[in-house]
Image (cartoon, rainbow, N blue to C red):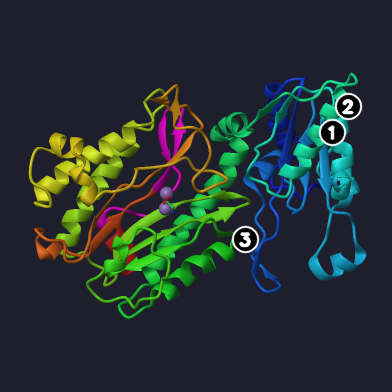
Amino acid sequence: MPAPTSLELAEYAARRARLIEAIGEDGVAIIPSAHEVIRNRDSHYRFRQDSDFLYLSGFHEPDSLIVLAPGRKEGPFSLFVRPRDAAREIWDGRRAGPEGAVSQYGADQAFVIGEFEGQLAKLLSGRSRVFYTFGEHPEWDPKIAACVREIREISRRGAAAPTDFVALETTLHEQRLIKSEAELSLLRKACDVSAAAHVRAMQATKPGSWEWQVAAEIHHEFERNGMECGYGSIVGGGDNACILHYKENESQLRNGDLLLIDAGGEYRGYTADITRTFPVGGSYSGAQKDVYEVVLAAQLAAIAELQPGNSSARPHEVATRVLTEGMVALGLLKGDPEELIKTEKHKQFYMHGTGHWLGLDVHDVGRYKLDGKPRPFVAGMVMTVEPGLYIAPGTPGVDPRFHGIGIRIEDDVLVGADGPDVLTHGVPKTVAGVEAVMRG
Ligand code: GLY
Ligand code: MN
Ligand code: MN
């Protein structure tokens, strides 16, 4: 039977091999899966696998555990999974069981999850370092701690007990930060479909539409391509665009208002993250256009910074400078842009960062600083670039024509060996480009 994973088994094996190298022969890594979460009474939220777990195994079931123990004669990769259960499988769906964990997912050995505590002593014994993130998995923390205690007891009689507990994140998340070609092909698909979804939303939006109806257009495009939302969609018309994490999506759209949509589809675990802001009636007003052009200029300048070797802090520095100069030119702020940035006056209208890593998580893993300094970009990193300006309704001292304008433009950009590669190029963002799409 072919593996039901999103990528070739060899890709997961290569990822584990890299982690195993970092763990060393005296270490062992324990990575729990996600578990199902109740939505209400006996209904669950749709299950989403833990991203670290998915990255290392491609295994989609809850209540499972990966143990990587280098140097074992059986092989390093143990998978603990739910047992096969004919009755439960009729009600809840298929399970791979230990046999499937080996034959379909390439585990060197597999056990039912109930055997974890019994096997753990064997897996930990003789190893000094345990890579496990305490505090994140309340159901496993006490079991692992109890096992270590037990080994310590025995160790008084000779066996070596673990002495170092290391959070797994640093090593694994640095690995996840650089995307392979196989990962990029999934991310490109997520970005292409998400771009098409934004185009569909632009074409479907009319004065009188409701925000939730436009959200449905986006979600339809995701789902008909085998995707789901990578995060909660923001569909905010008029003043709602000035609420950064607006998620009610409950208002009616009026001619003359802008609509800000921040939505990205997830394809086989990898999510896009796109924002566009377009006029409900099909044409930007003068004031809207003035603000929009500033945000677009900031975004283009920031994108140009995603070059290997550049500091990863550059996009935010550049975007902040262009936005602040624009705010002064528009009369939103008064003074010297450099001084305004130094005293953080720009934060009245631009209060968030310019981007984040993107991948299996929308705010993906990986450090932003190394030794306290912003790290340089390396080919294979993917970052969002998402400057915005938000002028809350009724802001004193600001020309009323700008009141209630909230604009963000967000693309997903691969740091390519030859420079920035905008993965979300499929949805227009110039004033003329957006207005042309809306005309149909
Ligand atoms: N959609 C979440 C973000 O843009 O960071
Ligand atoms: Mn984002
Ligand atoms: Mn976003």
User: Magenta includes 29?
Assistant: no
Query: 140 or 67: which is nearer to us?
Result: 140
Quadrant housing the C terminus = bottom left
Q: Is residue 115 left or right of residue 44?
A: right
Q: Which mark is residue 278?
A: none
Report the mark closest to the observer, 1 or 3: 1
**Which numbered disc, 1 or 3, marks the residue that appears first in the sequence?**
1
- Magenta-colored span: 411-432
Give the residue drawn at x 22%, y 62%: 392
Q: CA distance from mark 1 to mark 3?
A: 47 Å
Residue at point 44%, 74% (across, down): 212
Query: Do the residues bearing badges 2 and 1 touch, measured as CB atoms within 8 Å?
Result: yes
Q: Which amino acid does the dot numbered 2 rest on?
A: Ile
Residue 415: x %, y % from top left: 44, 33
Question: Could you say which disc has been placed on residue 154 in the image?
Answer: 2
> Residue 61, relative to residue 400: is it above or below?
above
* One can see residue 320 in this view: yes
Q: Crowding at label 1, few (<14), some or many (≥20) Cα neighbours within 10 Å?
A: few
Ligand 1 within 8 Å, label 2 CB: no
Residue, disc 1: 150
Residue occupied by mark 3 = 226
Asked if residue 212 is positioned above or below residue 2 in the image, the reply reads below
Residue 132: percent from left, percent from top: 69, 35
Place residue 17 in its image quadrant.
top right
Q: Mark 2 or mark 3: name the one nearer the start of the chain.
A: 2
